[in-house]
């Protein structure tokens, strides 16, 4: 049975239901939680370094390959280059360009995402806050101009009611899966954006984060707020480590702790934030 969300995401494996879950969080991605909000990181620092190095190597070889094919194309009038050979060179050049088109966003993602790219869930206002590399999303068709903006970021506030979880798999023999939030138009299944919630992991572990967040949002007992990297009374340490210096707007950092829609509205009015 296909996903009810449209357009359907590539690699879809299953839709996830909202509601409280009894399973505990067997995970280390929870950075901080208190009675108002929680923060999950989505990038492991060691993995980020590894993949950044991997993509840098790929970028060097890809650039060399692309320039080499381009040089060979300019030699098309060389009598030693036969039409069949020229066709292979052109195909190689196109393949190299497509490879770079896919590789560069991944390189930008790993070079310019810092401090785990936390995602914040406020259960008292029902808001979700994201501050991440623009290349963290699932867009494939990108305007060429964005490749000149490596530090481009997406900083947004979402409604929890408009976010819906799905599981996708990476089509590899390792059977890794990820949890993605489908951002839908209010009251519909029409997808307008995607947010990575829980990157690739094996087997049933892919649902632990989703279950914990759902339990947290409805104040269910299985969501222990002291399960994280920082205890609930260590908010200052958490913000110093994960939030400060990352370009979070001041109003948004205050909104993490908003305890009602009225308090949130007052914060936005004070900072002249319009919807």
Image (spheres, helix red, strand yellow):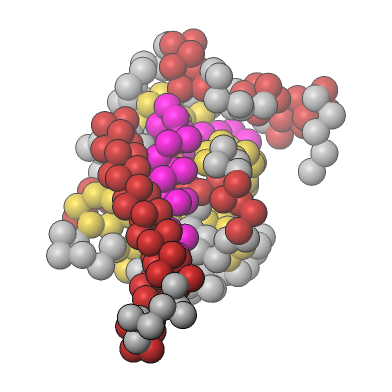
Quadrant for the C terminus, please. top right
Look at the picture and state if 121 lies above or below 243: below
Q: Residue at x 44, y 72 (%)?
A: 75
Look at the picture and state if 134 lies above or below 238: below
The picture places residue 14, in percent across and down from the top left corner, at 35, 67
Look at the picture and state if 232 lies above or below 113: above
Report whether 83 appears left or right of 259: left
Q: Residue at x 45, y 78 (%)?
A: 76
Using the rendered image of the protein, determine whether residue 119 is visible from the camera's viewpoint: yes
Furthest residue toward bottom: 83
Using the rendered image of the protein, determine whether residue 40 is visible from the camera's viewpoint: no
Identify which residue, 264 or 118, lies in the foreground. 118
Q: Residue at x 36, y 18 (%)?
A: 230
Query: Is 103 within the magenta?
Result: yes
Q: Which residues are magenta?
A: 97-126
Quadrant for the N terminus, please. bottom left
The picture places residue 18, in percent across and down from the top left corner, at 44, 54
Query: Is 158 within the magenta?
Result: no
Identify which residue, 143 or 266, lies in the foreground. 143
């Amino acid at each position: 049975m296909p996903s009810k969300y449209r357009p359907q995401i590539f690699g879809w494996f299953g839709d996830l239901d909202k509601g409280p879950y009894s399973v505990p969080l067997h995970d280390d991605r929870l950075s901080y939680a208190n009675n108002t909000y929680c923060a999950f990181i989505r990038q492991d620092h060691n993995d980020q370094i590894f993949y950044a190095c991997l993509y840098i190597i790929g970028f060097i070889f890809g650039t060399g390959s692309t320039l080499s094919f381009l040089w060979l194309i300019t030699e098309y009038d060389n009598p030693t280059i036969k039409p069949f050979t020229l066709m292979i060179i052109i195909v190689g050049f196109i393949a190299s360009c497509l490879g770079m088109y896919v590789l560069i966003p991944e390189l930008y993602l790993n070079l310019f995402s810092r401090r785990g790219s936390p995602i914040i869930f406020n259960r008292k206002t029902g808001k979700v806050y994201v501050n991440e590399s623009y290349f963290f999303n699932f867009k494939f068709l990108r305007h060429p101009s964005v490749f000149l903006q490596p530090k481009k970021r997406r900083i947004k506030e979402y409604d929890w009611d408009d976010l819906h979880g799905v599981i996708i798999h990476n089509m590899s023999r390792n059977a890794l899966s990820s949890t993605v939030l489908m951002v839908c138009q209010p009251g519909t299944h029409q997808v307008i954006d995607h947010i990575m919630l829980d990157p690739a992991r094996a087997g049933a572990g892919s649902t632990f984060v989703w279950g914990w967040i759902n339990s947290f949002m409805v104040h269910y007992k299985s969501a222990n707020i002291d399960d994280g990297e920082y205890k609930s009374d260590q908010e200052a340490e958490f913000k110093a480590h994960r939030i400060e210096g990352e370009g979070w707007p001041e109003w948004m950092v205050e909104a993490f702790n908003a305890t009602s829609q009225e308090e949130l509205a007052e914060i936005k009015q004070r900072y002249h934030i319009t919807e």
